[in-house]
Image (tube, rainbow, N blue to C red):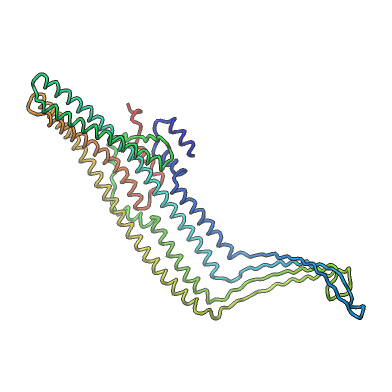
Amino acid sequence: MSLALGLALSHTVHAQSLVDLFGAAKQYDATYRGAQAQYEANKAKADQVISAIFPTINLQTNATRTHANANSTSSTFTFDRYYSTPNMVLSLNQPLYRPANLLQYEQSKLQLAQAVQTLVVAEQDLIVRVSQAYFDVLASQDSLSFVLAQKAAVAEQLAAAKRNFEVGTATITDTREAEARFDLVKAQEISARNDLSVKQLALETVTGVVGAKPVPLGVKDALSRMVPGHVDEFLQQAQAAHPNIRTAELALNVAKMEIDRAKAGHLPTVDLTMQQNNQYNYGGTSGNASTNQTYWFHAATVGVQMTLPLFSGFSVQNRIKETVALTDKAEQDLQAARRSVTQGTKSAFLNLASGLGQVNALQAAEDSSQLALDANKLGYNVGVRINIDVLNSQSQLYQTKRDLAQARYNVLMGALKLRQANGTLKPEDLSSVTALLKDRKSTR
């Protein structure tokens, strides 16, 4: 989706799904587009290496104009004339045995595979960034709605305190407490509105869609089905498919080939050479007294050229030592990548499991808080509870609602981050998340 289309949609549709906004981000986000450009550059660079095994053909031409003048006591060697000498040389060189070139060609294919893995990492990073911005907006919207609901509840409680004070069944303290809580909620409303504007700006920055309206979470109880399974399954997937591990493995293979390339510095090279030389002389030559004559010269040669390195100041030996050390480094980088992926996968797995536990606990806390609020309201009406008890119960209930909403979004993000951690995250995974999201208006 182009940026112009994204801007148009922001004014024509009511809500954008996570899949839609990710598609817009792929066309807009500068970081991801830069990664795409780098991949194209790496691809072109890999294609350049093939020239080392293909023949090289050159054509050289030149033309000269000569003025020759000679005087002698003998008329035989007296002349004054101009003559032209155009020349054309066509040459071809085809490598027959250059092991270093073949190894470089094989390395280029591995390096292109590394570029593919780097692009995969960039795509996974974009998925997480778009999703995080998406859910941040939803969480901020929920927070604002809960603050507004609390504001309405406090206003109702304030009105009740004033009525009770007027009829003499409550003290002025109840009214002052309700007024203080109402002012506090108004301050929270200002903060919530500002936070929503900031989160919407962040979503716009990554997607390029102005005024995007994410589809809210509709099936709230569906999160209970997101059981992560066993961590060993994710670890096995990570070791087999994580792009960082694949990149390190490819880098190790490239390093091993570089050792062979360095050793090839001791080996001979064999090339097939061909050359054709065409030279013409119009008007004679300086060594010929005759004029108005044309001479031509044609020569074609074919040969095989072998070059055997004998001594290069120990540069080949030192180059071999360097490549061996770099191969050791590549092996350590591979081990570091595997350990880092393992740690990241385990941490993401634990975070997701913990998030699911928090959702369950907060759901129970929400029910308990609602019961506590109802009990305090009833107690306030019959005179066994004071106004501050009701206000505190309201505050606890809406804070629990905000925490629960945030915990739900954290679980959704945790599922995506777990797949990112083990390297299996794909754009198709957004569809399963989108299935949990639906427009609330459509369910009314």
Q: Is residue 88 above or below residue 206?
A: below
Q: Quadrant of the C terminus?
A: top left
Residue found at x 34% / y 46%: 416
Which residue occupies 43% across, 33% down? Answer: 10
Q: How many marks?
A: 0
Where is 405 relative to 42, above or below?
above
Left-right relation of 437 to 267: left
**Which of the 4 image quarters holds residue 197?**
top left
Q: Residue at x 41, y 62 (%)?
A: 249
Q: Name the side, left or right, on which 390 lies relative to 115.
A: left
Front one among 184 and 89: 184
Name above or below for residue 269 compared with residue 415. below
Where is residue 363 drawn, in percent x and y?
Answer: 21, 37
The foreground one among 100 and 398 is 398
Return the residue found at the far left: 384
Counting from the top left corner in percent of width and height, residue 49 is at 55, 62
Residue drawn at (50%, 60%), measured in percent from left and top? 109
Q: Nearer the viewer, residue 128 or 212?
A: 212
| The image quarter in which residue 430 lies | top left
Q: Nearer the viewer, residue 375 or 107?
A: 375
State the image coordinates of residue 346 (x, y, percent, origin top left): 29, 54
On the image, the x and y values in percent for residue 44 come to 54, 56
Q: Residue furthest right?
A: 75
